[in-house]
Amino acid sequence: MARITIASDHAGYRLKEALVAHLKGAGHDIEDLGTHSEESVDYPPICAAAGRAVVAGRADFAIVLGGSGQGETMSANKVRGVRAALCHDEYTARLARQHNDANVLGLGGRILGEGLAVAIVDEFLSTDFEGGRHSRRVAQIADIEAEEAGAT
């Protein structure tokens, strides 16, 4: 089973709670960084913390949720070493893992129903990175990230 860090803003809170229950029921080890209510909260630090947990090796994957999931995914992607993918169906989740070795999954709580979100999460977690020609491309992404980190 996987170690998963999960984080959301207020708009993703309800879906986050449903996913936490599902993931715990499936035997995964879950670290919930919040938020813990539907009270308005700024998501960037919470979602960056989820990404940092993956990069530091405290989690195998992270899931970030918001209303659309876009800002949350962008925030996680600001962490060096994170490859966050916003997914709206099982196909995009599968390709994010197979081709891009995504380590953070972004979801929109105001876009996805619970059943589809569960299916996306399960697909993401059960799909392995294919490597091969994709490894070269993932390495190129990391090179760009390193170049930008050194930019002034």
Image (tube, grey):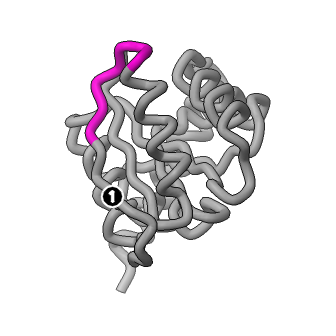
Look at the image and say whether residue 27 sits in the magenta stretch: yes
Q: Pick the quarter of the image with the C terminus.
A: bottom left
Which residue occupies the foreground of this view, 130 or 5? 5
What is the quadrant of the N terminus in the image?
top left
39 lies above or below 17: below
Residue 32 in the image: above or below residue 3? below
Residue 140 in sight in this render: no
Element type at marker 1? loop
Residue 90 visible? The answer is yes
Residue drawn 64% across and 51% down?
86
Q: Is residue 72 left or right of residue 108?
A: left
Picture coordinates of residue 112, whole percent (x, y): 72, 47
Q: Position of residue 70 (x, y in %)?
A: 62, 64
Q: Residue at x 60, y 48 (%)?
A: 85
Residue sitting at the far bottom: 152
Query: What type is the residue that disc 1 sits on?
Result: His
Q: Quadrant of residue 90?
A: top right
Query: Along the line of sight, which residue is nearer the eye, 16 or 101?
Result: 16
The answer to whether residue 123 is left or right of residue 79 is right
The tally of labels here is 1
Provide residue 106's location: percent of width, then percent of height.
Answer: 57, 50
Question: Which residue is at 52% across, 54% downward?
Answer: 65
Whole-percent x and y of residue 84?
Answer: 53, 49
Query: Could you tell whether 44 is left or right of 89 in the image?
Result: left
Q: Nearer the viewer, residue 92 or 78?
A: 92
For the record, the magenta segment spans 25-31
Q: Is residue 80 magenta?
A: no
Image quadrant of residue 27? top left
Q: Residues within 10 Å of mark 1 (few under 14, many from 20)?
A: some
Q: Nearer the viewer, residue 136 or 116?
A: 116
Q: In the image, what residue occupies the spot 43% across and 77% down?
A: 40
Mark 1, residue position: 36
